[in-house]
Amino acid sequence: MKKHNFSAGPSILPQEVIMKASEAVLDFNNDGLSILEISHRSKAFIDVMEKARSLVLELMGLEGKGYKALFLQGGASTQFLMVALNLLEKRAGYLNTGTWASKAIKEAKKLDDIYEVASSKEANFNYIPKQYDIPSDYDYFHCTSNNTIFGTQLKSFPDCEIPMVCDMSSDIFSRELDFSKFGIIYAGAQKNMGPAGTTLVVVKEDILGKVSRNIPSIMDYKVHIDSGSMFNTPPVFAVYTSMLTLEWLKNLGGIKAAQELNEKKATLMYSEIDINPLFKGFAAKEDRSMMNATFTLENENLKETFDTMLKEAGISGLNGHRSVGGYRASMYNALPLDSVKAVVEVMSELERKA
């Protein structure tokens, strides 16, 4: 039986994507070769890469607006440094809303002066700071749209006179945004777009080429743009599966349709957390993530019973991160509404038993 997969990442993929990817592992395009063994320089894979990059810009509404989509390696963690190498000349502003934002700040500080425009660290990152100034003479402003560990999410983004960079690893393609507000968007594929192994980077070309440092080729966005995201051997299978997921999303009705379903899932999940006296939400209500619902048991003596009930219901990946404890329901695009209903039923049943 297929389990209800709430893993925070690597996470759930659409079943039809898994089926198509598994077929390609055996025989890609009926060519007698596996997707795992074709040349990345073959026309077959170049077509995959071009289609994946094109779908990204189409879904984001960025076609013809000066943006390039790249599929790179190294995860979002490499982007922490790569962003700074390509954009940081004197100083940059960072919004610190969690573990990954803190790590991005740590890496950028190795190059130059970094200013935290605001932080929620004092409250263990259970809310998003709302009022802060972004100096117009900074090189760029960096934020993290969704905080997987703590279950918070930016509901709106500031208007910037400088390039805005956003780590969207855990909520990419989950809601409609004006993506043209951003100079760089990056996201590890493994949470909402594909398997682990590739990282999406969307770059507005005209913000590049303004730093004085000599950037190593492998870390230079312009090098990757000029080579069509093929400067070094790309993660072929991860890009292919991401392409399939992007096709699935387009056929679903695009980001608008995904958002409508995600809102239903989040509403159902948080409604149970709020009405069930056995549970308590971690994140401030106004900042709750649509992707990652974090909550704890009010009575830890019920944990063993609850965990057993979850296992019996075929529910996997609900354990919270050690920084928060408790539980975390990761409700990415591919998660069916029925999976959320399954968790809510177990939570309700626990209340009846308690």
Image (cartoon, rainbow, N blue to C red):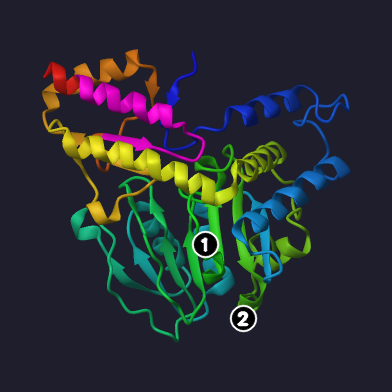
* Quadrant that contains the C terminus: top left
**Residue 83 falls inside the magenta stretch:** no
Image mark for residue 118: none
Q: Residue 119 appears in which quarter of the rendering?
A: bottom left
75 and 299: which is toward the camera: 299
Task: Measure the C-alpha gap from mark 2 to mark 1.
Answer: 16 Å
Residue 153: image location, x then y, percent: 36, 54
Q: In the rendered structure, are the residues bearing label 2 and label 1 in contact, judged by CB atoms less than 8 Å apart? A: no
In the rendered structure, the answer to whether residue 320 lies left or right of residue 107 reads left
Which of the two discs, 2 and 1, sits closer to the camera?
A: 2
Q: Which of marks 2 and 1 is nearer the N terminus?
A: 1
Q: How many labels does the image show?
A: 2
Mark 2 nearby-residue class (10 Å; few <14, some 14–19, many ≥20): few
Q: Residue 345 appears in which quarter of the rendering?
A: top left
Tag 1: amino acid: Leu
The vertical placement of 329 against 246, above or below, is above
Element carrying mark 1: helix
The answer to whether residue 257 is visible is yes
In the rendered structure, the answer to whether residue 133 lies left or right of residue 75 reads left
Q: Give the range drawn in magenta.
A: 327-349
Image mark for residue 81: 1
Q: Residue at x 85, y 40 (%)?
A: 44
Q: Residue 94 appears in which quarter of the rendering?
A: bottom left
Q: Which residue is drawn at 42% across and 68% down?
A: 109
Q: Name the residue under label 2.
A: 210
In the rendered structure, the answer to whether residue 36 lies left or right of residue 290 reads right
